[in-house]
Every structure is written in C-alpha cells, then in structure tokens.
Image: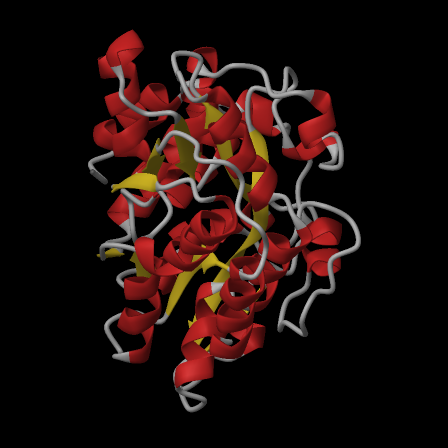
Amino acid sequence: MKTLRNALIATVALAAPLPALADITLYSGRGEALVAPIIAAFTAETGINVDVRYAGTAELAILLQEEGDASPADLFWAQDAAALGAVAGSFAALPEELVGAVPAAYRDAENRWVATSGRGRVLAYSTERVTAEELPATMAELTAPEWDGRVALAPTNGSFVAHVAAMRVTLGDEATAEWLEGFKANNPVIVRNNTAILQAIADGEADIGVVNNYYLPRQLARDAEFPVNQQLFATQGDIGNLLLVAGIGVLGTSDQTDEAQAFVSFLLSPAAQQYFTGEVAEFPVVPGIIVSRQDINIDDVIAAAPAVDLNTIGDLEGTLEMLREAGLI
C-alpha cells in the first residue's frame, strides 16, 4: 500500500504545476491518516496549498451551519451523505462536466455535492467466539437477547449517524426510535470509532459490531492474525447492508471557486480514485478504476444494499436528537 501512495505522489510531482493560485481551506471530516497523502499529491500537482481543519463530520456540519456566510471554508469533505445533505444549501452547484462521470445515485440531485468514494456497512465479528452461522441475519436482530452486552458501537461516528438517518427514511421514525431504544437496552459496548470497534472485538470486550468495510482490510494488512472477520448481513436488501459514500461540496461563499473545483476534480481523477481503492480499500465512484481484491467487493455490496436515496438522509440534527433521546449520545 505504501508503494501505491508513494507512486501517486511521485507521479503527480512530475507534472507541470499550474500558475500560482490562491490557497484553499478544507473542512475535512475524513481522518488525516486516510486523506493527508492525497491532499499532498494535489498540492504537488497544482501548487495550490490546502489549509485543512480536521474534525468529526457531524461536528463540522454543525460548525458550517453556525458560521453561515462568515465561514472561512472553501470546501467540506464529509465521510457521509447525511452531513452533506444537512449543509447542501450552503454549497454552490458543481458543473456537470466536472461531476458527470459519477453516477447520479452518488451525487446530490442538484450537483451541490458529489461522492468521492463508496463504502459498505458490514458486520464485523470475532473469529474466536462467533461463527458466521451464529451472526444476526438483519440489523434489527442486534437487539436480540443473545447479543446483550456483546455489540460494540461508536454512536457519534458519522457513518453510524448516517446509517440511522437512512433507517429513519426506510423504516420511519417510530420504528427507528424503537430500535435505538432496544439497542440501548441491550447494553452495547460504547467506543469512539470504527477502528475501536474492531479493537474491542479483538480484545474480547465485544463480539460483533457494524463498521465500514475498509477498516478491517487495513488492519489485516498490518496484522494478518488479527482475530476479526466481516461479512454482509445475510438478508438481501436489509438496512444493515447500507451503501454509503464520502463526498465533497464547494461552499457558495468561497472566493476560490476555481481552485476548490480543481480539488474536487483531482479527487475524481483516476489517480485519486485508485488511491482510495488500493490504499484505503474503499470503492471507486467513477467507471474504469481497477479495484484491488477485497474481502467484500462493490458488486456484493450493491447486490445486498437496500434502496436508499442518499439525497433524503440530510436531517442530521433530527437524527442526532433521536440518538440523544435514546441515550446513546
């Protein structure tokens, strides 16, 4: 994986930089360890410096709402569509020629944001204490008595918040609230993020947990004996098999629109899409990208995923309030 990262940066560094352009400010809900190399590659290719503010996706979405027109941000790169939808009204529409290669399902209906990579929600489990046959077949079954105290959960993680937002759209608020209350009553093991879910399972603090598909392959690349496996929920179309995206939008208040759009264009380029696929183990959102062999591939996820319009899951505050009422945050 380091070879791919180094090759990407080396390749773009050889390209002739554009004339001097203004710096841009990026609010990134994507972790620094994941995206710093691709940001460095963009600067090497274009000469445009990127001032990055890293924080949680939901936290940054709320900050953008509070800052309004006074926000210094030129771009918001979120790890989920719920946060993008929450601030979509602050984005300027992206040109069709810039985002047209991305399928319509992976961008805002008005092109106010566009996906940069895809990921599937999957069920991680201990290879020492659980067999694949014992796993719940649906996400609803996580509230069953046999999983009391055995499920690791990162309730403030952006992907989980987006997952709950999708549940609201698919199942309705009443059913979602009931599930959240049942989940809370089942004594989940609360942790900070997806990585911590996997570690809690490996350490014996929990037996299962729902995570994004790309965390375990990265862990196994470091430690082939890591005692965790993952799979999709067995029931096709179950909300547990949600297909999510990370995505980006350009703020309508930006004074560096050209430079900001150049950053979006770079993230959709073959080099960047190959980075997301090979280095991060996510799924590409533009055609023609060679996908490295993964334990769960994009075709599997698409086949198992429920039909959820990502444009409909933008009620971030309402979803956070539901999580508060359930006592999960």
Foreground: 289 or 156?
A: 289
Of the pair 62 and 94, the residue shown nearer to us = 94
Whether residue 100 is visible? yes
Residue 267 versus residue 8 in the image, above or below: above
- Residue placed furthest toward the bottom: 225
So how many labels did they put on this image?
0
Q: Give the quadrant of residue 12.
A: bottom right
User: Residue drawn at (59%, 29%), measured in percent from left and top?
Assistant: 310
Image quadrant assignment for residue 78: top left
Q: Residue at x 27, y 70 (%)?
A: 200
Q: Residue at x 56, y 21 (%)?
A: 312
* Residue at 23% from the left image edge and 14% from the top image edge: 67
**Quadrant assignment for the C terminus:** top left
Q: Is residue 90 above or below residue 5?
A: above
Q: How is the image coloured?
A: secondary structure
Instruction: Tell me: 187 left or right of 112.
Output: left
Rendered view: 29 above or below 114: below
